[in-house]
Amino acid sequence: MTASERDLYFVAVKVFLEHGDKFFIFKDSYGDWDIPGGRIQRHEFDIPLDKILERKMREELGPAARYRLGKPVVFMRHERVEASTGKKARIFAIGYLAVFLGGKIALSGQHGRSKWVSIKNFNPAGCFQGGWLKGVKDYQALRRK
């Protein structure tokens, strides 16, 4: 296999933020539903993943939202066209559990709408697609046990 035949992936960390029997989703500026978290930036290579998640949660949910981060529970592979370049990108994401402890959620300018949805009864096919859809389904199956 030559270097040009190898596939490149972005790496992301995501959070299934739970509050009782619900989990948090929000709509991004591109109109897609998502869960908190995102890609690891180039300069974050040596930073622990939980610290990267702290940054993402602060950026996306505001500094007052409190949570307790759990362990990774779901691994996702998602493919999409990047809005900024028009090119296909592949993302490998690690999905962590977290429990919402309180505080005011203040969405960033990148997220306009949010909701808490039932872990057991939410139909993710109405909001998610591709690898994100499979990841949410895997998470729900795990939490229904």
Image: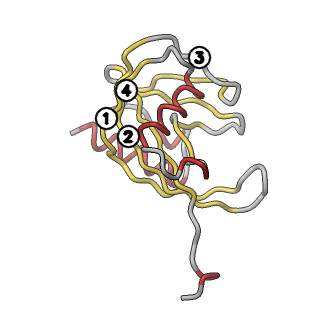
Q: Helix, strand or loop at disc 1?
A: strand
Q: Helix, strand or loop at disc 4?
A: strand
Q: Helix, strand or loop at disc 3?
A: loop
Kind of residue at badge 3: Ala
Residue mark closest to the camera, 4 vs 1? 1
Q: Distance between the residues labelled 3 and 4?
A: 17 Å
Assess whether mark 4 and mark 2 are in contact (beta carbons under 8 angstroms).
no
Kind of residue at badge 2: Tyr
Residue mark closest to the camera, 2 vs 4? 2
Instruction: Say if 23 sits above or below 63 in the image.
Output: below
Kind of residue at badge 4: Glu
| Sequence-first disc among 2 and 3 | 2
Kind of residue at badge 1: Gly
Residue under label 3, please give it: 106
Seen as rendered, the residue at the extreme top is 103
Instruction: Say if 95 sits above or below 11 in the image.
Output: above
Q: Helix, strand or loop at disc 2?
A: strand
Q: Distance between the residues labelled 1 and 2?
A: 6 Å
Residue mark closest to the camera, 3 vs 4? 3
| Sequence-first disc among 3 and 4 | 4
Give whichever of 125, 80 is nearer the camera: 80
Q: Where is residue 98 in the image (x, y as percent from the top left)?
A: 36, 30
Q: How far apart are marks 4 and 1 (CA)?
A: 11 Å
Which labelled disc corresponds to residue 70? 1
Assess whether mark 2 and mark 1 are in contact (beta carbons under 8 angstroms).
yes
